[in-house]
Image: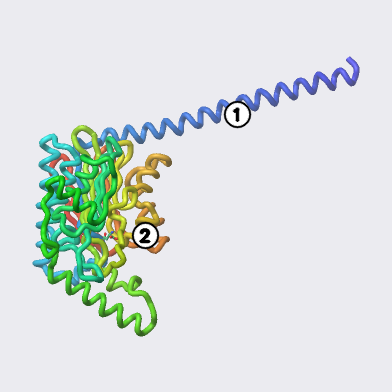
C-alpha cells in the first residue's frame, strides 16, 4: 500500500467513525427527548391520579385588605356571603349541572349583594353613575360573551351569558347591550338600584383627594394607593363540572372615579376571563389596565399549554413575577382540567373561597 492509498483508507475510517459517533449522539438525543416526554406523562399521570370529579373557586376582589381595618361583623358578613355564593355553584356541580351554570348562578349571588363591586354595590364613575362590565367563557367550545358599560341591567353576568348563547357576537357595550338585554327578557332596573352610600362616599373622597393632589404636585390620583383601593370588590368564579368542562366568569363595576367610558379587564376575554378545557379557567381581579396589558388570564393558560407548567406554577409566574414587574396589583382564581385550584394575588388580601368535590370549603381574606 502506497502512502497515498493508506492515507485514503485512514480518511475512510475517520469518516466512518465520525458517522457512528454522530448516529449514537442522535439516538441519545432521541432517548433524552423521550425521557423528557416520559416525565411529562408521569406528571400528567400524577395529575390524573388526583383528578377531582368537579371543583369551584370564587373571588370577591383583591386589594389592600388588612385585618386592622376590618370589623369582626364586616369580616363575618363577607365570609357568610362568599360561602352562600360558592354553595350555590357547588350544588349545581354536585347535581351534574354545567360549569357555565355554576359560574353564572354563583356570580348572581355576589352581584345581588351590596358588599361587592358588582351588580348592586358597584362603584361610581367620576360622573357619579354606575357602569358595569362582565364576561363569561366556555372552556369546551371557547365561546365567550361580554358586556361593557351597562347602566340598567341588574345582573351583567346574565347579559354576558346571553351574548354568548344567543347572539353571533362576543362583546356588546353601552345602550346597544342594554337593548339586547331587554330583548332577551333580562331584568332591567332603574340605575338608582346600583347606588349605595358607601360607594358614593368613596367616589366623593376619591374626587376630593384627586383635586388636592392635582392642585399640589400634579400627580395623577390614579397612582394614589388610597384611591386605587376604593375600587376593589370585583367578583369572579371558575369551575370544572362532572363532564370535564371548564368555565369562568367575572363581573364588576370597574374602578372608582373612572371616566371617559373607561373599560377595565373584566369584560376582556383573555385579560379578565379565560377558559379552555385543555388547560384551565381563570377569573381576574385588580388594576384592570395592567391585566389588559398583561393578558393575564390567557397568559396563565398559555404557559400551561405551551410550556407545560402546572396551574400553580403558571399562576405564580404571571401574578408574582410578570404582573408585579409591570407594576400591576391584583390576583386571580383558577381551576385546571383536573380540578386543581389556584388563588394567587400580590396584594395584602383577596376575598376568596373554594370547594372541592368532597364538599370541603376553604374561605380566605388576607394573605395567610
Ligand atoms: N379589574 C377591575 C377593573 O379594573 C377592578 C377590580 O378587579 O377590582 O375594572
Q: What residue is at 13 percent from the left and 47 percent from the top?
A: 105
List the residue tagged with mark 2.
290
Relative depth, front residue between 331 and 203: 203
What secondary structure is marked by label 1? helix
Q: Quadrant of residue 227?
A: bottom left
User: Does the closest atom of ligand 1 sit within 8 Å of the Cβ of label 2?
Assistant: no
Task: Name the quadrant of the C terminus.
Answer: bottom left
| Of 240 and 348, the residue lying toward us | 240
Residue displayed at 21% across by 40% down: 166
- Single out the residue that lies furthest toward the right: 2
Residue at image coords 31%, 51%: 268
- How is colour applied across the structure in the image? rainbow
Residue 335, percent across and down?
Answer: 26, 44
The residue lying toward the viewer, choosing from 278 and 176, is 176
How crowded is the residue under tag 2: few (<14 C-alpha within 10 Å), some, or many (20+)? many
Is the CB of mark 1 within 8 Å of ligand 1?
no
Write down the residue under mark 1.
25
Q: Which image quadrant for residue 112?
A: bottom left
Which is in the foreground here, disc 2 or disc 1? 2
Amino acid at each position: 500500500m502506497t502512502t497515498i492509498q493508506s492515507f485514503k483508507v485512514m480518511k475512510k475510517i475517520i469518516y466512518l467513525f465520525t458517522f457512528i459517533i454522530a448516529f449514537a449522539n442522535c439516538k441519545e438525543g432521541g432517548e433524552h427527548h423521550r425521557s423528557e416526554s416520559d416525565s411529562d406523562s408521569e406528571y400528567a399521570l400524577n395529575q390524573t391520579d388526583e383528578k377531582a370529579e368537579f371543583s369551584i373557586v370564587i373571588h370577591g376582589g383583591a386589594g389592600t385588605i388588612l385585618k386592622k381595618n376590618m370589623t369582626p361583623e364586616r369580616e363575618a358578613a363577607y365570609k357568610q356571603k362568599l360561602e352562600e355564593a360558592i354553595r350555590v355553584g357547588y350544588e349545581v356541580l354536585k347535581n351534574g349541572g354545567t360549569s357555565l351554570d355554576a359560574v353564572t348562578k354563583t356570580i348572581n349571588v355576589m352581584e345581588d349583594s351590596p358588599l361587592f363591586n358588582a351588580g348592586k354595590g358597584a362603584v361610581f364613575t367620576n360622573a357619579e353613575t354606575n357602569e358595569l362590565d362582565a364576561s363569561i367563557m366556555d372552556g369546551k367550545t371557547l365561546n365567550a360573551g361580554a358586556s361593557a358599560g351597562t347602566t340598567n341591567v341588574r345582573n351583567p353576568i346574565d347579559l354576558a351569558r346571553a351574548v354568548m348563547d344567543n347572539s353571533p357576537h362576543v362583546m356588546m357595550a353601552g345602550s346597544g347591550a342594554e337593548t339586547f338585554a331587554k330583548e332577551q327578557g333580562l331584568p332591567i332596573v332603574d340605575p338608582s338600584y346600583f347606588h349605595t352610600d358607601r360607594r358614593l362616599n368613596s367616589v366623593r373622597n376619591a374626587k376630593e383627594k384627586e383635586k388636592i393632589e392635582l392642585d399640589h404636585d400634579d400627580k395623577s390620583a390614579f397612582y394614589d394607593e388610597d384611591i386605587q383601593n376604593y375600587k376593589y370588590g370585583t367578583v369572579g368564579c371558575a369551575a370544572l363540572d362532572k363532564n370535564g368542562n371548564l368555565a369562568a366568569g367575572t363581573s364588576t363595576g370597574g374602578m372608582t372615579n373612572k371616566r371617559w367610558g373607561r373599560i377595565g379587564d373584566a369584560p376582556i376575554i383573555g385579560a379578565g376571563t379565560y377558559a379552555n378545557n385543555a388547560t384551565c379557567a381563570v377569573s381576574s381581579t385588580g388594576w384592570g389596565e395592567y391585566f389588559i396589558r398583561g393578558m393575564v388570564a390567557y397568559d396563565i393558560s398559555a404557559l400551561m399549554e405551551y410550556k407545560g407548567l402546572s396551574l400553580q406554577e403558571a399562576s405564580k409566574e404571571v401574578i408574582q413575577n410578570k404582573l408585579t414587574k409591570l407594576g400591576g396589583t391584583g390576583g386571580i382564581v383558577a381551576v385546571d382540567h383536573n380540578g386543581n385550584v389556584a388563588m394567587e394575588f400580590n396584594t395584602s388580601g383577596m376575598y376568596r373561597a373554594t370547594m372541592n368535590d368532597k364538599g370541603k370549603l376553604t374561605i380566605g381574606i388576607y394573605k395567610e
